[in-house]
């Protein structure tokens, strides 16, 4: 199944002032993320647990220079 052909409800942050933001959607299986400038392009899929870990890491500044590859 190509997730791009499903009827997911895609959302963009209210802080986004253009199409140059990521968009997210979710269903019972996963949380999906895509480039708002290229909605027919690749889609990343995260388990719900992995998505929570990602969001918690971003909110808690859990990404150090070495984990980003620039240190």
Image (tube, rainbow, N blue to C red):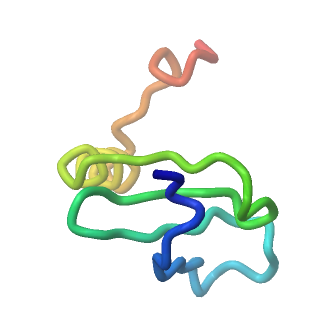
Judge left or right: residue 10 versus residue 28: right
Judge left or right: residue 1 versus residue 69: left
Q: Is residue 14 above or below residue 24?
A: below
Q: Residue at x 44, y 27 (%)?
A: 64
Q: Is residue 10 above or below residue 4?
A: below
In which quarter of the view is residue 52 placed?
bottom left
Which is more toward the observer, 19 or 71?
19
Judge left or right: residue 67 versus residue 12: left
Q: Residue at x 50, y 67 (%)?
A: 24
Which is more toward the observer, 63 or 49?
49
Q: Where does residue 47 sit, x and y in percent of width and height?
A: 26, 48
Q: Where does residue 61 sit, x and y in percent of width and height?
A: 39, 44
Which is more toward the observer, 40 or 15?
40
Q: Residue at x 72, y 51 (%)?
A: 41
**Of all residues shown, which one is farthest toward the bottom?**
14
Which is more toward the observer, 42 or 16?
42
Judge left or right: residue 12 versus residue 50: right
In which quarter of the view is residue 26 placed?
bottom left
Q: Where does residue 39 sit, x and y in percent of width and height?
A: 72, 64
Q: Residue at x 22, y 55 (%)?
A: 48
In which quarter of the view is residue 30 placed?
bottom left
| Quarter the C terminus occupies | top right
Please count the marks in the image.
Answer: 0
Q: Where does residue 12 sit, x and y in percent of width and height?
A: 59, 78
């Amino acid at each position: 199944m190509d997730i791009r052909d499903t009827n997911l409800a895609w959302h963009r942050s209210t802080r986004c002032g253009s199409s140059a933001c990521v968009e997210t959607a979710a269903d019972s299986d996963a949380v999906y993320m895509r480039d708002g400038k290229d909605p027919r392009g690749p889609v990343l899929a995260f388990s719900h647990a992995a998505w929570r870990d990602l969001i918690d890491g971003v909110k808690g500044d859990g990404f150090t220079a070495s984990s980003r590859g620039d240190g």
